[in-house]
Amino acid sequence: MKVPVSPLAPAQFPTMPAMTGVSFAAHACGIRYADRDDLLLMVLPAGTTAAGVFTRSKCPSAPVDWCRQALEDGKHRARAVLVNAGNANAFTGAAGMESVERTVKKAAEVIGCDPSHVFVSSTGTIGEDLPDERITKNLETVFAKAMTEGEAGRDWKRAAAAIMTTDTFPKGATRTAEIDGVTVTLNGIAKGSGMIAPDMATMLSYVVTDAAIGPDALTAVLRKATDKTFNCITVDSDTSTSDTLMLFATGSAGNKPVKDADDKRLKGFKAALEDLLRDLSHQVVRDGEGASKFVEIRVTGADGNKAAKRVGLSIANSPLVKTAIAGEDANWGRIVAAIGKAGEKADRDKLAISVGGVTIAAKGRAVEGYDEAPVAAHMKGTDILIEVDLNIGKGKATVWTCDLTHGYIDINGSYRS
């Protein structure tokens, strides 16, 4: 079914600078979709370091298994990323890994690199064998496009569009930072719309920086930034079998290599990476299937930060809360119920709930005489703020979600048809 662009989409795709030695091409292979790009090949310069975080699902896709092992076997080096849309190559048994191996072997031959330096991802329908011959027969053409198209071979928007499934807009972000006085750039793309819940990535995303950073440091900073961003979003509480987030550092900026994650020279880079991942993760939520409102939930006064996050996610994942938001109803009773079921320490008579900056419930009951007008006006907007103060400790956390509309049912009810 044709789905309109999310009303929460950014006004435009950002202008993202080219990076020395990084090129890519998108191609229509007909894996599932007709008349659109469904394959992305990204080529990275020799010496690029790699880090990744992946789904914690106990039923991961074959590409996820490959990437985990390739990081170890290839000593966290990368030369290529290959992503297809339309077929997840998940729950496909031994045939799934054989498909990955054939694809990787061909890509490595075309590029001229070790197979362990090729990272693959697949997104789309689960349980269907991947027609990998549609990929392999096109790889020489796709590689040639990446190498010869000049600026067109560094079209980040087209790259982001090629990996979309139920997404309604391509997602990209760019940032800069300084290491030893050298300006470094970070570019990232992502896809995600449904099956979004925090669990080590929650979508497909690829970030490339021209900074020189060793694999241990790169892995550490990626994991920390992920926990504060992609692991704080949820659309529907469902974690995908294919969730992958990878960060590549080419070293072409020319800074002195950083090998330790605690090196003070990484301070600006860490902030830029976290900001970029937050931007991408918010775009995923804003493209939540059927979403009409972006929701930020701030929890304070909890019995620790982890407890605050669990409370926040309990609220964010509540169908009753999400449908109330869709209906523009500040139903604080549903928020209380979500807090109570979170399994964390809470005191009904101490907590306070605010919507749009107005406290509407406190000390076990509604705030008498609160002004409903600004709350009602806030609920009619597209960006909703819910604040919960448990008033029992110092723990705090922020999570992001979207509302739940009939559009979610429409999209998922017809996904395979």
Image (cartoon, rainbow, N blue to C red):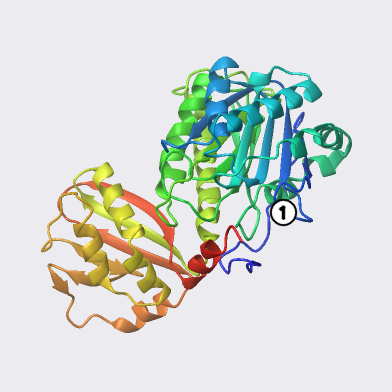
Q: Within the image, what quadrant is residue 121 found in?
A: top right
Residue 252 located left or right of residue 343: right
Residue 24 located left or right of residue 200: right
Q: Which residue is mark 1?
A: 33
The residue closer to the viewer here, 74 or 9, is 74
Residue 386 shows up from this direction: yes
Q: Residue at x 67, y 32 (%)?
A: 81
Residue 215 located left or right of residue 18: left
Query: Mark 1, residues whose alpha carbon is within 10 Å: few (<14), some, or many (≥20)?
Result: some
The residue closer to the viewer here, 114 or 92, is 92
The residue closer to the viewer here, 291 or 64, is 64
Q: Residue at x 21, y 50 (%)?
A: 302
Asked if residue 4 is positioned above or below residue 92 in the image, the reply reads below
- The residue under label 1 is which amino acid type? Tyr
Asked if residue 260 is positioned above or below residue 319 in the image, the reply reads above
Q: Within the image, what quadrant is residue 119 found in?
A: top right
Q: Residue at x 50, y 23 (%)?
A: 217
Label 1, secondary structure: give it. Answer: loop
Question: Residue 61 in the image: x percent, y percent?
Answer: 53, 36
Question: Residue 300 in the image: x percent, y percent?
Answer: 26, 53
Q: Residue at x 57, y 43 (%)?
A: 204
Question: Residue 345 in the image: x percent, y percent?
Answer: 15, 50
Asked if residue 323 is positioned above or below residue 246 in the image, the reply reads below
Asked if residue 80 is positioned above or below residue 158 in the image, the reply reads above
